[in-house]
Image (cartoon, coloured by chain):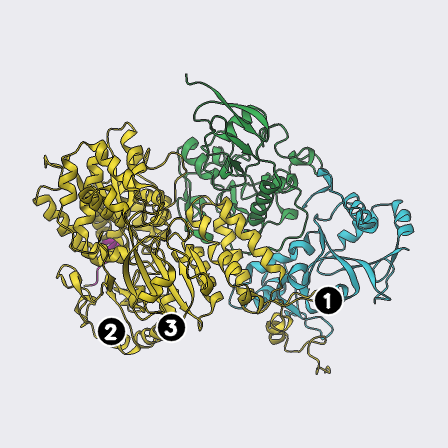
Chain colours: A green, B yellow, C cyan
Amino acid sequence: MAEKFTFSLDGQEITAEPGQSIMKAADAAGVYIPRLCDTEGLKPQGSCRVCVVKMNGRTVAACTQPARADAIVESETPEIMGYRRDLVRMLFHEGNHLCPICEASGRCELQAMAYRLGITQSTKYPYLQPVRPVDASHPDIVLDTNRCILCGRCIRASRDIDGKNVFEYVGRGVHKKVGVNGDSLADTDVSIDDRAINLETCPVGCIIQKGRGFFTPIGERQFDLAPIGSNGKGRKA
Amino acid sequence: MPESPLSKHAKAEQAVMAICERFGNDRTRLLDILLEVQARFRCVEPSLMECIARQIGTYRVEVEGMVSFYAFFSDSPRGQVVIRLCDDIIDRHAGTEEIAQVFSRILGIGFGETSPDGRFTLEYTPCIGMSDQAPAALINERVVTCLTPARAEEIALGLKQGLGPGELDLPEGDGNNLNPLIGSMVRNNIRLRGEVLLSDVPADAGLHKALRRPPDQVREEVERAGLLGLGGAGFPAGRKWRMAADTPAERRFVICNADEGEPGTFKDRVLLTERADLMIEGMTIAAYAVKAREGIIYLRAEYAYLRRYLDTVLQRRRDQGLLGTDADGPGGFDIRIQMGAGAYICGEESALISSCEGLRGEPKNRPPFPAESGYLGYPTIVGNVETFCCAARILDRGAAWFRSWGTKASAGTKLLSVSGDCERPGVYELPFGISVRELLDLAVAPDAAAVQVGGASGQMINMSQFDRRICQEDLPTGGSVMVFSAKRNILEIVEYFLDFFIEESCGYCTPCRVGNVFLKRRIGKIRQGLCQPEDLDYLRELGKTVAETSRCGLGHTSPNPVLSTIANFPLVYAALLKINRDGREASFNIQSALEESRYLAKRRSMIYDPTYEGD
Amino acid sequence: MKKRIATVSLAGCFGCHMSLLDIDERLLDLLKLVEFDRSPFNDFKRFTGRCDIGLVEGGCCNEENVHTLHEFRANCDILVAVGQCAVMGGLPVMRNAIMHAEDPLRECLETAYLDSEYVLNPTNSIPNDPALPLLLDKVYTLADVVKVDYQIPGCPPSSETLWQTLNALITGHRQRLPYELIKYD
């Protein structure tokens, strides 16, 4: 087995194995780096960029960047926190995120990330207010793509865990979206038991299980109690 | 008897299956399969996506992901003749709009539309590599340049009367464009021939010398020459070669990036036309140096008119024993051409590799670098056309000879594509380190007021900066130099570049996908006089976030037009900004916000229509 | 000197105002610090003087909202967007989803008053009394229309959130809201 090494993360010494990402090494040490597109059990893809850190002065995504011996990594600096706020705001402004009526409110990672980053100040970004469809064709599942943040977690879960490829990116640029393998969701072989449909997979309220909304009282929801990442690993308690 | 829809569909499926089979039902050749299906059916509709997916063992949504990614594919039928008018900023300044009106008028359709009889489609397309002979357009694969309203009318009428794009009577080009295999009206516009690439080069001299030396010495020669990638990124070519050679692997690949898409660049077009052998020689040397047996030329879709010629050159070299897996000579190296399908991002080397693998042209995460794990997971050298040409020359004349031109950090000469407001647009081969002013003098641009160096992703400089030098130490460029006179609107140019990036962003990462849209919106508001001095801070901050946090070079550089013009043309902005005293947003217009309501309610506003007196 | 405060609900539901009333007995403390000018709390319909703080609930969906917002901006030193509707449009902004239709406002009104199967509308007409303010082409956030100094998210912001924010604004002691008081729902 290859030798372990250490690097510095905000002044703290972190142990890593060769090839291990900064994120994985930090998780193992119980240090949380904010993230949205990355989640346990799925291959990291480095697309949301919320996990950006500076490694020896260069901005990299902690989820895909292998740790390097003796690297100096900065995460919770004012500059990086500023980038993260900007990125989370971009996601809020790109889609239609109506927290007051969203089934995922209180367990939504996008919302929780905004809380954690203390986003209360008014923003100058414009709301893009796109027109996006809701696919309620399936008996058990609804896709409200207004809330999609293109994290690709459902895509990876369906492909790599369920072996189904129900979802995939289509389009490009600001028109990029998550497509389904058929004319609508009912056309696909998706099932409510798929990992892709699991409530933990979609970080927002885009994938909704019919008949399962608002099941936890306000005040007791996951992120009512503690900020995302409180247990050092993001979502799972 | 009219064909029944069922049998028509069955026939279409059969044809699609045959196409897939010709590519061995290979999932990694999906781009080629789609190019043929698109050419044959003028679209890849969902039923055909399903058929392709079945045949090559993938999913319909993956095929849809590909079709929706590349601009040259469509899921509903395009016309038999697709006219793609280049609407790059240089072309716009040269009169694209007028040309567009002529096509629209004669063909009876607007841009983005297909005629009801299915004969014609009109589209706009970003830079097609003809900025030196703008306005230009693609008619299917045929290139038409130097369009005037009269010529556009002649072309449109000819097409309407049933002439095929190949049958149009057009002027002749120059140089090898006259070769019947190219047969194009494109002109090379070579204005200055330097000693490295555009003067006469002896055939395969570099290759023969390289083959007499062990591969590691060939690599060292390239490293010693200080050859940097000439596509724009400027990574040391020799280091890439070394990394690829040092990575243990069963297969290695050499890919030539002929996806010249940076607005205002066209020097690779000239090299592909005039120096195809030299480029392939360079690739063959690289293959020998890293022990690669397979090569790919990734040719942008806009340069499809060069394909037949390049195929012939490859075949001739196979016949000469210079290429081909059976040859004993240069390590049994062979090359195939991979056509692109309209995506600027594929000029980024890892996106180009994705594209060659039949995937959406999205960049890959690094590390691993392509030289360690690239095409199909094997060590891969991706180099620009010009880089491979230089490598061949270095092996012939030696590193010291190459280093005798240029600067410390940028050795050799550079092909510069000059376009815009100058008398002599075209390709100039000059040593690195040349000042912008010297170049402008050569191109005869006495009215130059602003110069965009490095394409859309480069820097815009003002007159007081014309003594800056083109090289890594100062102004790096992949070759694009766009000249603008004082009559041009700087912010129109900036807004155009942002539109370009919005259109061409792959959308993978948040800052590039969303941030560029925000940048563009604010520039648009500034142009309308609706912004305040604080908005410059907004642009600077947003630009920094996009540049710092994006995943690849596109997002790292897309804010450059904004940031460099704020720095270098402060008065242009200052003239448009107004200090806001009443706290009202200038961009909110109550009159237009009420227009529809007045119309629907059939009454006027009691508050905002001052003459209103009620019923 | 007591700070002067004005409040209003535009395209909102008065929920944010109700939430402010939920500070209960602390209302008495508040009244020691502030004096209310134009506000539904005292039913003053017009400004009586310049105000230090304007609290605006709701976004802009009609001309009267815009007019009122302009008055608030002109009469208040600090303008605060209170609640999700003021901040990002809230529920009313859902009508912007048809903004790109051919004839969005007509479609919106016809769906709301005529076409929906859940509507009982015997006269089959769309309300159009001259006293009704004209609708805007879409719903605008406060920041779309005027410069906004601060925003308090939430639907509604909890009474505690409002209380702490108001305190900070009145006393001028800026502070970070504790985690549990930042809510968007």
Find residue B16 and report its horizontal and vertical position in percent: 23, 49
Does the magenta-highlighted stretch encompass residue B608?
no
| Residue type beneath disc 1 | His
From the viewer's perspective, is A236 left or right of B374?
right
As measured in the structure, the alpha-carbon distance from the residue carrying label 3 to the one carrying label 1 is: 41 Å
Please tell me the numbered disc located at residue B155. 2
Give, as a single range, the part of the protein colored magenta: B2-9
Figure check: B153 above or below A50: below
Q: Nearer the viewer, mark 3 or mark 2?
A: 3
Label 2 environment density (alpha carbons within 10 Å; few <14, some 14–19, many ≥20): many
Find residue B531 and report its horizontal and vertical position in percent: 60, 65
| Residue type beneath disc 3 | Glu
As measured in the structure, the alpha-carbon distance from the residue carrying label 3 to the one carrying label 2 is: 16 Å
Which residue corresponds to mark 3? B97
- Secondary structure under badge 2? helix
Q: Do marks 3 and 1 share a chain?
A: no
Which residue corresponds to mark 1? C70
Label 3 environment density (alpha carbons within 10 Å; few <14, some 14–19, many ≥20): some
Residue at x 24% of width, y 49% of height: B13
**Would you say the magenta stretch is mainly helix, strand or loop?**
helix
Q: Is residue A193 visible from the viewing direction of this image?
A: yes
